[in-house]
Image: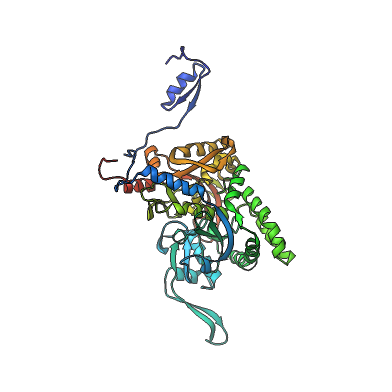
Amino acid sequence: MKLESFDRQLTVINVGLETFAESVRAQGVEVVDVDFRPSPYDAPRLYRTRAGVDIEAANAEAVRRIASGKAVLVGLGIARDVIPGMRDQMILHAGPPITWDRMCGPVRGAIIGACLYEGWAQSPDDAAQLAAGVGAQLVGVQLGGAQLVGAQLIAPLRFEPCHHHHAVGPMAGIISPSMPVWIIENAAFGNRAFCTLNEGLGKVLRFGAFAPEVIEKLKWMETTLYPALDRAVRSMDGGVDIKNLIAQALYMGDECHNRNKAGTSLFLRAIAPALARTCGDRETIARVIEFIDRNDHFFLNLSMPAAKALTEPAEGIEGATIVTTMARNGTDFGIRIAGLPGQWFVAPAGRVKGLYFPGFTEADANPDMGDSTITETAGFGGMAMAGAPAIVKFVGGVPQDALDATLEMYDICATEHNTFLIPALNFRGAPLGIDVRRVVETGISPRLNTGIAHKEPGIGQVGAGLLRAPIECFVAAFEEMRPTTDDR
């Protein structure tokens, strides 16, 4: 192919075979290769649902609600007291619904840890039996012979997704009744969302660890960290504007899913004066500040419920094909869409490609898990990786990969965010509103970044990496919305 009649300064975009590009480069013309392939799915553009609802109008309203929300931290509380529908002997978990027999190792490990933390069991074996529903457990204090004082009969446990209770949880996502949780309110719509406090990295409950030091840290968080933070937050007029902190953190190199250094620093700066005013014990103040400062992921457990609070108002809009939930439990990956808010579309959880801690390899890894993909659903996280090139040091790859990830996501989203902006893209809004129609039409599924848990219970985190959401979930949702005739 000759290009004699063309200006040699032009750039050619190649969407064909590599040999086409080679012949053009040989003539001194710059070529940009695009990894393009047509979708393998029969996916004509849907304009109306089976009931005749205008999908474009419905989607426009869905993303308007998500973008216009105001996520504010208004306080903290104990899960059983503040999470709707939460009760004793209930444990919430990440991802779509699942039973004990199908749960992966780290989720089982985290549930064992929760049983030990709650005092429902005195050993990991007893906790596993209780979780499996093998009889009831009698717990209490034995004082001489067979006399039990303060004994309690613990019936088999009930497991439900965090998302069924306006909550989210990272990795295993376990929330048990006594755990303290953040309370995030969407001031524009009045709904609330909840999440536990972040323990840090490594050997922690959310990655399936349940050693004595894990439980000891959780107890300190309940008895010392939680009351101090709750007093401080409730003393602040108007609470803490978490959506604004997310927007600032995106300017500073976070994407607020797997990179939260800026977000954590901004939150600490916001809360520190109130901590000093409301906590009379100087050592407690010092320990709380040190705990937050030493945990670069502390802000994750604020950005997640903020995303949940922002996306929930879009649920229930008839005909909307915008994804409002993406979640995984280490066994299944599930999505829900605005037009069908109570229905899960599920596929097997994916395998993560990433960087591993010394001594661990891909063979040790559990499949993808956690509710943290709510961040991508709300327009940041993997959607904003272009603004967080340093994240590749944590999840693998090179900075160009972060840029490419965001640019590709524009192809499957309905709009661009008006608040979450990316400086590296000339302050362009991050992709917002994953549309199942676009995913199926293009064959492009959302890019995600995530932590990696060991596949066996009790070990904890072993790395972090990247993957794509399984496209089968989106195909199933697409087919559910697709008219049965050609009247589209």
Compared across the picture, whether 209 is left or right of 4 comes to right
- The quarter of the picture where residue 39 lies is top left
Compared across the picture, whether 122 is left or right of 471 comes to right
Q: Is residue 476 visible?
A: yes
Residue at the limit of the structure toward the top, as seen here: 4
Query: Residue at the location (46% across, 46% down)?
Result: 63
Compared across the picture, whether 223 is left or right of 150 comes to right
- Residue 90, image x and y in percent? 46, 68
Residue at the limit of the structure toward the right, as seen here: 282
Quadrant assignment for the C terminus: top left
Q: Nearer the viewer, residue 462 or 349?
A: 349
Quadrant assignment for the N terminus: top left
Q: Is residue 366 visible?
A: no
Query: How does the figure colour the protein chain or chains?
Result: rainbow
- Residue 430, image x and y in percent? 52, 41
Q: Nearer the viewer, residue 363 or 77?
A: 77
Q: Nearer the viewer, residue 295 or 314?
A: 314
Query: Residue at the location (42% across, 39% down)?
Result: 444
- Residue 443, image x and y in percent? 39, 39
Disc tally is 0
Q: Nearer the viewer, residue 181 or 311?
A: 311
- The quarter of the picture where residue 181 lies is bottom right
| Residue 56 vertical placement versus 13 (above, below) | below
| Residue 28 vertical placement versus 367 (above, below) | above
Residue at the limit of the structure toward the left, as seen here: 485
- Residue 404, image x and y in percent? 51, 36
